[in-house]
Amino acid sequence: MALGIGTLGLTDLVRAAESPLHARAPHFAPKAKRVIHIFPQGGPSQVDTFDPKPALEKYHGRPVDEVLKDFTKNAGEAASGMGRLSGKLQRSPFKFARHGQSGAEISELFPKLAAQADDLCIVRSMKTASSVHEPAQLMMTCGELINVRPSLGAWSVYGLGTENQNLPAFVALSPNGTTASGDKHWGNAFLPAWARGTSIATKDSEVNKLIEHLRSGSTSIREQRRQLDLLGEMNREHLGQHPGDAFLEGRILSFETAFRMQVEAADAFDLSREPLAVRELYGDTEQGRQLLLARRLVERDVRFVQVWHNGWDTHDQNDERHRELCLAADQPVAALLADLKQRDMLKDTLVIWAGEFGRTPTSDNNDVAKKKGIGRDHNAGGFTIWMAGGGIKPGTTFGASDDFGALAVEGAMDVHDLHATILHLLGFDHEKLTYRYAGRDFRLTDVHGHVNEALLA
């Protein structure tokens, strides 16, 4: 009752500000209502996971320019810059097999995910504009290499609002609550503050550690409500002098969401409330807990969840590290898809598995003396991602890289195209979802991007 009756004071203020977080319709009927973006940070090797290359076996150990003259010179700056594609061609030790009715070729590293091949849309022809981690990560999450821009999640919340005022509309899950390149990946930049994501550190699984200070240790719910109502009166007066102040609107909504989270967040973030069989399905690992939490959040109408799986920068011991990383990812990712499907949620939940770039089909020649084993360098010229659910065509393998898996050569798709396609699935014309700032209309895709119709169901 305290929560229900007491919210009236600040609710009036939120209404006065015409709360933009209220759910709204997009440009046209969406196929996806919510998004889970799993980010394998560091760059997974496409030739070891989803893009088999028999030519690497044939030419293993030979310098790439010896096999194809001037190959690296013609690769383009993003792919060949900093000598990324130099060195000797390096085969994959992992076996590939066809799976499902679609016949999708998937590495032995993902046996559980392979069982759901007919739900996947594998894109083998991604490319991006930088082979350096931080800019490439920002490109994948924000559509921009250097300048501060709103994230994909923030644009989604800006366009759609939320259907649950008691939880953040956009949640970012990472082991330490941040990334090596900062928190811009869930930032709002010049969009209103209420579009920004809320970061959660997932290294601890207990609710009071996942969300610190969730409840006051000294002030009752009723007293907090009285304090917020007083604050609401003060903000109402201030808002009257500064109508349409997006920062103030964001501050008001942040206070209100934090207050309401005391009730719903305790339930949403408490994984012990899941049946044991479901927890075992995901596995009691960090990635398992992350993805189970992601499912619980989207089930409660959180609009966008970003999940960071770190450690894929395999300059050293590429094969050994991919065994560990894929083992950590395989069961939880497969569980997420199966769980969403069983709950009839996969059809309108878009799941994306996409890092900042891939890895070279050549051995990494940098600091060889210090390496414990053969690694692979960054590769921006051609890499693989996959998507599932939310209006994506299932059982599809789109595009192709060259014979070695270095460059996208068929159906090349850059990050702007990916973003345009995601926004389309959410019901938006990416050219019309804009925000006026500093005298111009900005959009996620800048002046680029095309919806890839071949990926749509």
Image (cartoon, rainbow, N blue to C red):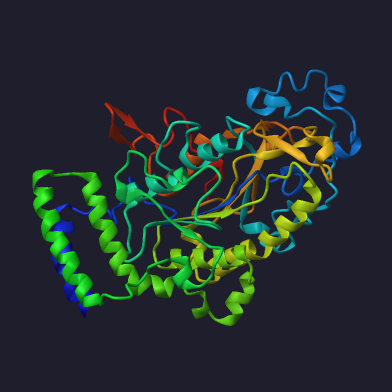
Q: Name the residue furthest front.
A: 218
The residue sitting at 53% across, 70% down in the picture is 205
Residue 35 seen from this side: yes
Is residue 103 or residue 445 the one in the foreground?
Answer: 445
Residue 104: image x %, image y %?
71, 52
The residue sitting at 79% across, 41% down in the picture is 375
Q: Quadrant of the N terminus?
A: bottom left
Q: Is residue 166 left or right of residue 37?
A: left
The residue sitting at 49% across, 53% down in the picture is 391
Is residue 394 or residue 408 the one in the foreground?
Answer: 408
Question: Quadrant location of residue 298?
Answer: bottom left
Q: How many marks?
A: 0
Residue 322: image x %, image y %?
75, 52
Q: Is residue 211 left or right of residue 86?
A: left
Residue 345: image x %, image y %?
48, 65
Task: Relative to 336, say whether 218 is above or below.
Answer: below
Residue 159: image x %, image y %?
33, 47
Is residue 198 or residue 444 the one in the foreground?
Answer: 198
Residue 269 seen from this side: no
Q: Is residue 199 left or right of residue 20?
A: right
Is residue 332 or residue 250 the one in the foreground?
Answer: 250
Task: Relative to 285, say whether 421 is above or below.
Answer: above
